[in-house]
Image: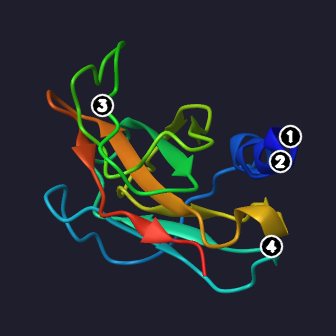
Amino acid sequence: MKTAHALVVSAIMFSACTSANAALIGPDNLVLSVSEGCPGRVTVRWEGAAPDHWAAIAFSLSRGRYVIPSIQCAGTELGLGTDHFGATRPFRTGSEGQGEFHPRITAKACGGYLQMIVVDGFPCTISEVVQIP
């Protein structure tokens, strides 16, 4: 069963990130959103990230209190559980701190949760947890 859930993490990990054209919200207002369309291709958007910083999107099938154990964001507490936890490859937030990508989400991952992590200091900035509709 774990391999079916790994497909969503794999899909998110290898999706290309593109910059969006919208107004900058500001680094203190990181907003992550995901469009309807699950299963299938969805749009994951972010706004208000610190411009041109490294970031990742984390995925889990459950909410919880996962604490990042190592690297730049060590000690940052996420609102995600450990049930099939995974994250994208690091990507840049874009010159205006916003962007989007279009992963294909498997049926078994529908209803799962996403959260964005931006490496812009310590602790790292995180978005609210969003559910994949």
Question: Could you tell me which residue is drawn at 31 percent across and 44 percent down?
Answer: 78
Q: Disc 3 marks which amino acid?
A: Val
Question: Could you tell me which residue is drawn at 75 percent across and 60 percent down?
Answer: 103
In-image side of 51 versus 25 (left or right): right
Question: Could you tell me which residue is drawn at 23 percent across and 35 percent down?
Answer: 124
Which label sits in the foreground, 3 or 4? 3
Residue denoted by label 4: 41
Q: Disc 1 marks which amino acid?
A: Thr
Q: Disc 2 marks which amino acid?
A: Leu
Asked if 4 appears above or below 67 in the picture, the reply is: below
Residue denoted by label 1: 3
Q: Secondary structure at mark 1?
A: helix
Q: CA distance from mark 3 to mark 4?
A: 29 Å
Checking the image for residue 67, the label placed there is 3
Residue denoted by label 2: 7
Q: Secondary structure at mark 3?
A: loop
